[in-house]
Amino acid sequence: MKDKLIELLSSCPTDPEGNRNVAVIAQHLLDNGVVVFDNDVVSPENRPLIQTVAGMPVNEVIDLVKAKQEGRIIVPPCKVGDTVYYNLGKNASLPFGTRRTIALPVGAIASMKYKKDWFVRTEFGGAIGDFYFSDFGKTVFLTREKAEKALKEYESDA
């Protein structure tokens, strides 16, 4: 069983950034019958093998998976304090020498009644910008390299 668990963990899928987060690992284990949702957290014969997943107690991982299934948990594309990168449109009026890809510090991750979805709030030069999670990988990026690559592709298509 220990070999099977190691095999399952190493075959666990990754998110778009290549990371394995707790929710992905927990769901993969659930999908493969390792963790069950009844009074026992782990089937009795496997109890000694699985006590933590990604350093978290299995009970906490199960709580997270249940919360995600019930729509009570979000997985933001970044965290407060990170820097994200936004490409200014090709028609933007820019001073000579200004980069078209700008770095924006993330100040908040929120949802508001009048907004359609969760968003990341940034600030640049006193201006506030909100980016929906669905904007990531399209108009806002986690690395400058990915943003500049997308800008080159966009400009070559235009």
Image (cartoon, rainbow, N blue to C red):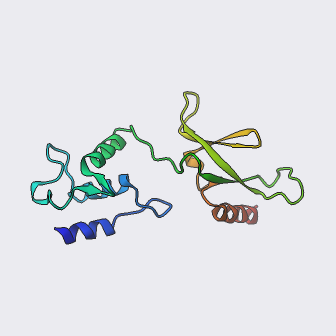
Front-most of residues 27 and 50: 50
Say which residue appears at 74% left-offset and 39% top-offset: 127
Front-most of residues 139 and 67: 67
Say which residue appears at 26% left-offset and 56% top-offset: 52
Residue 53 pos. (x, y %): 29, 57
Q: Residue furthest top?
A: 113
Which quarter of the rendered picture does the N terminus lie within?
A: bottom left
Residue 156 pos. (x, y %): 75, 66
Choose top left, top right, bottom left or bottom right for residue 148: bottom right
Which quarter of the rendered picture does the C terminus lie within?
A: bottom right
Residue 30 pos. (x, y %): 25, 54
- Please state the total of marks drawn on the protein image: 0
Q: Residue furthest left?
A: 45
Residue 134 pos. (x, y %): 56, 48
Q: Is residue 51 left or right of residue 28?
A: left
- Relative to 14, say whether 117 is above or below: above
Say which residue appears at 34% left-offset and 40% top-offset: 67
Q: Is residue 106 left or right of residue 99?
A: left
